[in-house]
Amino acid sequence: MAAENRELASRARRIYQQFLAEYGEPEWKPSRSGFEQLIQTILSANTTDRNSGVAFQTLKDRFDSDWDAVRTAPLDEIKDAIRVAGMYNQKAPHIVQTLEILFREEGCYSLEHLREMEPADAQTYLQRFPGVGHKTASIVLLFSYGMAAFPVDTHVQRVTQRLGMSGRRASAEKIKAVWEEMLPADTYFSLHVNMIRHGRTVCTARTPRCANCVMQDDCDYYARLGEWDDAPPG
Ligand code: SF4
């Protein structure tokens, strides 16, 4: 590993440890199957966890957890069931197309075959589904199967950019690659969860609370306060 990368890797470990000391070790406890996590994550785009959770439960209740019935139902019925999650004109067909692919290829609504795949292959496999990008695929792999995939949402992207672990305008995909290269897989869940917590409560988009932040010593944004332009990074 080149000297520059060694420095970045050691910084990544410090950041991981600092978040751990501040927020503790979150418990990895899969609460739903990979398949259900995929549907839930499709519903979660551009809405709150609460609304996507309500939409998911309503969908299951409305169809008695019968995914065959969801797959063959009139689209308007699905849209109505998931309305609270917003963007139902896109999300409903994405759900149906996902069910159709699984039914056609696997004969059932399950992603358990992912357990047999290498993480990179599983990531590519999931990104074939409609509306599934690297974030959704990584969430399914990490949260349901504990596989080596680091999901990057808007909070993780912003905090990473500010800390200086990536360029200031680095894409979410680039940031995913940075963390996956710099840290071992058994850190991903903890770092992901703790970084989101940090982004929601301290390193917020518009007014980061730098004066109260434990990351000051390892943060580019803090080191250059006053030099960054007005537009918050990320
Ligand atoms: S010091 Fe400021 S910019 Fe850096 S991580 Fe903390 S809150 Fe964010």
Image (tube, helix red, strand yellow):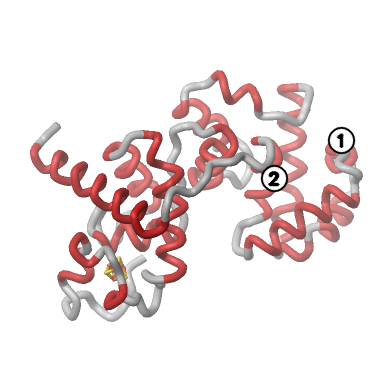
Q: Quadrant of residue 112?
A: top right
Q: Amino acid at mark 1?
A: Asp
Residue 180 position, x and y percent, is: 34, 38
Q: Which image quarter is the N terminus in?
A: top left
Name the mark on residue 68. Answer: 1
Residue at left 40%, top 63%? 198
> Percent position (x, y) of residue 2?
11, 35
- Res. 39 mark: 2
Residue 57: x %, y % from top left: 80, 53
Residue occupying the far left of the picture: 3
SS label for mark 1:
helix
- The amino acid beneath tag 2 is Ile
Q: Residue at x 26, y 63 (%)?
A: 215
Above-or-below relation of 138 to 45: above
Q: Secondary structure at mark 2?
A: helix
Residue situated furthest top in the rendering: 116
Label 1 to label 2: alpha-carbon separation: 14 Å
Q: Is residue 54 left or right of residue 30?
A: right
103 vs 110, nearest the viewer: 110
Q: Quadrant of the C terminus?
A: bottom left
Question: What residue is shown at x 63% (from left), y 65% (from top)?
Answer: 48
Q: Would residue 99 be found to the left or right of residue 223 on screen?
A: right
The relative height of residue 231 versus residue 161 in the rendered view (above or below) is below
Q: Residues within 10 Å of mark 1 (few under 14, many from 20)?
A: some
Position of residue 87 measured from the top left corner of the image (x, y, whole percent): 69, 62
- First of labels 1, 2 by sequence position: 2
